[in-house]
Amino acid sequence: MRSVPLVAPRRLELVQSPLPEGPRAGELLLQMRAVGLCGSDLHWWAEGRIHSTPARYPQILGHEPVGEVIAVGPGVEGFRPGDLVSVEPSLTCGHCEFCIAGRHNLCVHARFQGGPEAPGFLRDYAVIPAHNADRVPAGLTVHQAALIEPLAVWVHVFELEPVRLGDTVAVLGAGSIGLLGIAMAKQAGAEMVLACDKVPHRLELAERMGADEAVLTRERDFRELVMDRTRGRGADLVYDAAGAPETIALGLQCVRPGGSFVLIGIPEPLEFAVDLHTALAKELRIQAIRRSNHKGAQAAALLASGRIPTDLITHRLPLERAQEGFEILHSYADGVGKLIFDFDRKD
Ligand SMILES: [Zn+2]
Ligand SMILES: [Zn+2]
């Protein structure tokens, strides 16, 4: 089968590798059909690490997968060959304190498929635990279904820090996570969603996803805009989907007193200064987010309802063009929003 490991910083290589073993009891063998490219894949690709964890070459990236069930292991119920499924990428132990509490994303033994500890899905076939699979509802294309995993991150975010009816929400960063967050906030009843990014073409995507106003950070002082639109009060909720030191600083300034700052994006520098005095003075809630927590089924239902626009998908590339795909997303080239690798495509 084809697989595309990262073999060095910024270098993916298409290789032939043996089929995975299985499915054993409780497992599914999948043929991958589409895999979305995530900002965290780009961190591994560009920097060869995420915070202090180095990549382990060859490392297979890709954790927003959609696959077709090819074979079902003994004892598996509810799936048959031919089913289209989305996959929760975290392999969790099920018996640690945090798994038992239902907080699987905090599992102390978690292995993330796409991290250095377990292969991701930029490969033709994968064997996964059946309990990590969510059936794709009829009516969704494989490309739309590749949004289930990133949207599941938002279902998780909303469990921790939900939008309330009438809230003003600021979203920093309009990459694919920020774009999905804009749509989620709007659907959840936000009165106003303001967004910013440093890349001009993303502003139009942000508006297509439901932002009331989206501005370029170098042209418009975003804090001023938020204060303007809220008569000096600030946003109830700030979601930082960029995670840059600048956006964290900006975000803390944009929250209203007693509001919430939610960090979803992953910062690139290992250490940097954060102005916690602003947070103290306003008694902010600061919520960090780690991936998702088995919210694929809810995310799939949301997408199937048609309430979350899928306009953010701009690129569908064959696996052979993986290297080019990473380069496009990393350089914000070609008007890219969400980029998806389409395994059925040949060119
Ligand atoms: Zn991701
Ligand atoms: Zn666990």
Image: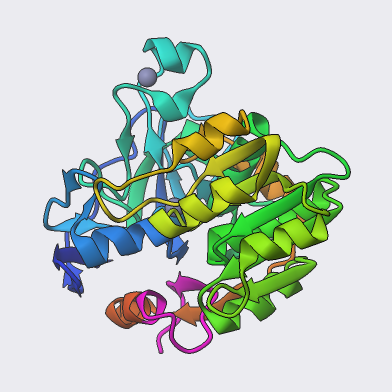
Between 151 and 222, which is closer to the camera in this rendering? 222
Is any part of residue 68 visible from this angle?
A: no
Q: Quadrant of the N terminus?
A: bottom left
Q: Look at 55% across and 75% down and name the residue there.
A: 337
Quadrant of the rendered image holding ligand 2: top left
Q: Quadrant of the C terminus?
A: bottom left
Which contiguous range is marked in magenta?
Answer: 328-347
Q: Residue 261 at x, y = what percent?
A: 58, 40
Between 16 and 151, which is closer to the camera in this rendering? 151
Q: Look at 13% across and 51% down and name the residue there.
A: 56
- Is 125 left or right of 17, judged from the image as shown? right
Q: Residue 302 at x, y = what percent?
A: 74, 49
- Is 343 left or right of 134, judged from the image as shown? left
Residue 100, relative to residue 302: is it above or below? above
Between 329 and 13, which is closer to the camera in this rendering? 329
331 in the magenta segment: yes
Q: Residue 48 at x, y = what percent?
A: 18, 59
Q: In which quarter of the image is residue 112?
A: top left
Q: Residue 189 at x, y = what percent?
A: 86, 47
Between 32 and 94, which is closer to the camera in this rendering? 94
